[in-house]
Image (cartoon, helix red, strand yellow):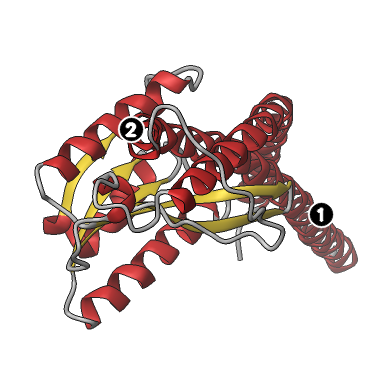
Amino acid sequence: MASLKDMRVRIASTKATQKITKAMQMVAASKLRRAQTAAEAARPYAEKMSAVISNIARAAAGSPGAPVLLAGTGKDQVHLLLVCTGERGLSGAFNSSIVRLARDRALALMAQGKDVKFFCVGRKGYEQLRRQFDKQIVEHLDLRSVRQLGFINAEDIAKKVLARFENGEFDVCTLFYSRFKSVIAQIPTAQQVIPLVVEESAGASTTSYEYEPEEDEILTRLLPRNLAVQIFRALLENNASFYGAQMSAMDNATRNAGEMIRKQTLVYNRTRQAQITKELIEIISGAEAV
């Protein structure tokens, strides 16, 4: 059995840990408000951009001059998985849930005989994926030095992806990130960005429009920017999801530390009481023997 001194040290250590987790919870809560606002502000622009491009793409359907970012390479052999995760841990299952979704997709594609490559954005995803797919990771981008995410960061990633696509290094690119829903709910999401998937909306208008310049020329300009917009949205969603997950994880850790302190204190008091009782019995027995 541990001595009373060891128990006191253990209780003090747990209390110090509780203070740290509580402080981290408060910091995450303060940063979450700004990150959530940024993510929610980016959603309408990204969704409207997709809607506009889908509208134009439907008009350009079947055109021999359709941009390759829309039409694709005509093959489906090499897949690039653009996996965006956090730079830090202590956020529950935030990072591992994104990695799990990407890993499952990679294994499913490989089972079909496809070639899979990874582009990792974020240290945690890279560290987890390299254990199993080290030779398939073609690029890793670390954003730890970035204090505040900007569109320029997304543009940099988009340029790297487009350069690889233009060099014929892959046929399909899928973006993986975590969509922020609430503090306790973040949804791992996979979104194909190359070639762009044109979804038919239920209330799509059948009106015919004439575009100036031509649809193909408009799409050639819009599609690269749309890629950067979708990546920027993913980074902002990830940022909000990270702080939400970290806030929830640190709250649970603080509660668990409190419960552990309660149990440790109870054991300490019982042990101390038993030791005092034993000492009193020894004193009384000694006095009676005299």
Asked whether 104 or 67 is in front, the reply is: 67
Residue drawn at point x = 38 percent, y = 37 percent: 219
Residue of label 1: 262
Residue of label 2: 217
Amino acid found under the numbered disc labelled 2: Glu
Amino acid found under the numbered disc labelled 1: Arg
Q: Is residue 125 left or right of residue 33?
A: left
Q: Is residue 166 left or right of residue 39?
A: left
Question: Can residue 81 be seen at all in this image of the molecule?
Answer: no
**What secondary structure is marked by label 1?**
helix
Q: Relative to 37, does residue 267 appear above or below in the rendering? A: below
Residue drawn at point x = 44 percent, y = 38 percent: 231
Residue 140 spot, x, y in % from top left:
24, 39
Asked whether 127 or 180 is in front, the reply is: 180
Whichever of labels 1 and 2 marks the residue nearer the N terminus, that label is 2
How much space separates mark 1 and mark 2, taking CA atoms?
A: 68 Å
Residue 165 spot, x, y in % from top left:
18, 45
Asked whether 7 or 196 is in front, the reply is: 196
